[in-house]
Amino acid sequence: MRISKEYDLSNLMISISGVRGKIANGFGLSEALLFAQSFTTMMNHGNVVIGRDSRPSGPYLESLLTAALLANGSSILSLGLVPTPTTKAVVKLSKARGGIMISASHNPMEWNAFKFISKEGFFFNAKENETLIDHLKRFQFSPEMIHPKGAVGFGEEYIDLHIKSVLARINLTKIKKKKFKVFVDAVGGAGSFVIPKFLRELGCAVVEHNCKPDGTFPRPPEPTPAALKSSEKAFLKSKADIGFALDPDADRLVLFTPKLGAISEELTLPLALRNILSSSKKGSKVVVNLSTSFLNEHVASLFGAKVIRSKVGEANVVEEMLAEKAVFGGEGNGGVIDPKVPSFGRDTLSGIGHILNLMAEENKTIDALVSELPSIHMEKQSFPLPKGFSLETLYEKFIKGFPKAKTSQKDGLWLSEEDRWIHIRPSNTEPIFRVIAEAKSNEDLQQTLKRVKSCVES
């Protein structure tokens, strides 16, 4: 299947998070084939790992990818329905040339995406993405082979190795003794099988909710407290000790507690971080992105650790973690990154393991642990990004609106005052720009949001 050099990619979101778009409206077979051919050219006959979430478009996009890779002489390790972190871990564990996760993460079902993975198990960095796009723009792809030698294999044993790598990071004996009852809402996505299996390895009694990957999402795919209202009722009814909600590709984690129900995704990382820092050296470094709550600075201060802020995006956090030799990292959207797990990226298995380990080691309920954190006062707002819209002009308005704030343009515009911060940036995954603000009190947050509104609407 060859397509014309005349193509339109304007409806696609191309970023550090890969390429994504709406099926048949930007990310159809023709566009997907372009990226498949470009990726195949970069793989240069090497072994490639493919995983996907439960979207109905996933199987035919995997078939397209498989055809492009086989035609180029590559062999494929097909994982089927697995979390994104599992695909990343298997790339590293199998010593593959690279991998692709087929998933649009928290986007609605009409979207899908390719997330490109390098041989180290990391998402493509900026340079690798530039190479990918360069092949595409020049329409310079490796030719199909008449007699390719590649084959398709399946890698269940590697999925088990990912689970074992997380088990090695926690006190399995102590967790098993607790016999936790755990509720899991996998939104019918990629974590529907792996997460319950992992929890049973921990000796937990598992209550499965939305764990049938039938190609539909029974609730909004982004696991925010607002999207989890019906799941919250099921959790409370289950009388479980703790609950976990995932996004469709299972790299983001949100908690349920018996007293509070679904809680902010911003609480996931500081709880996991507390578990890691309790056994880390003083002066250890932690990396979070610019849009992540300063709850992490609070936890780090308890153990004499230092928090470094990176650009938004898993690949950017990982790059900074490598540069700083950080012991832990993540993002405030529920993404936990443990560098000693081969996924070395946002990993729900890792997040679940560290939080259950914290409960077991400290012999505390999840509600008790949450109560020891300061209250969070944060607002996340999104606005459409019309064509021709000038972000630079918007940034100027914010700088004038917050004249006493320290500024950084490492990633969009970040404004920091003593008791608050504001981050304005275009999304990597949707045609919008985001404004996120956090303050130390609700009163201060509301005053800040009034000033934000004035800057956006003026």
Image: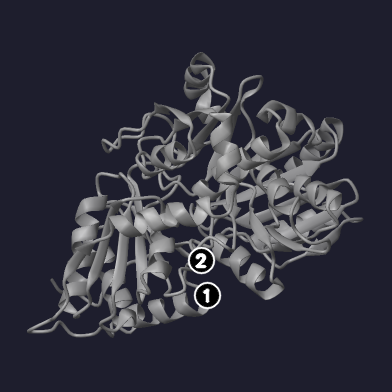
Can you tell which quarter of the image residue 286 is in?
Answer: bottom right
Residue at figure coordinates x 74%, y 44% from the top left: 437
> Where is residue 333 drawn, in percent x and y?
59, 46
Q: Position of residue 424 (x, y in %)?
A: 68, 54
Residue 113 shows up from this direction: no
Residue 271 relative to residue 59: left or right: right
The residue labelled by disc 2 is: 16
User: In the visual, does 418 lie left or right of 297?
Assistant: right
Q: Which residue is mark 1?
A: 126
Q: At which x and y percent is residue 301?
A: 85, 52
Secondary structure under tag 2 reads loop
- Sequence-wise first label, 1 or 2: 2
Coloration mode? one colour
Bin the neighbour count of mark 1 within 10 Å (Cα to Cα): few under 14, some 14-19, many 20 and up: few
Q: Residue at x 18, y 60 (%)?
A: 63
Q: Dot 2, how many residues are within 10 Å of its Cα: few (below 14), some (14-19), or many (20+)? A: many
How far apart marks 1 and 2 lie (CA) works out to 7 Å
Secondary-structure class at tag 1: helix
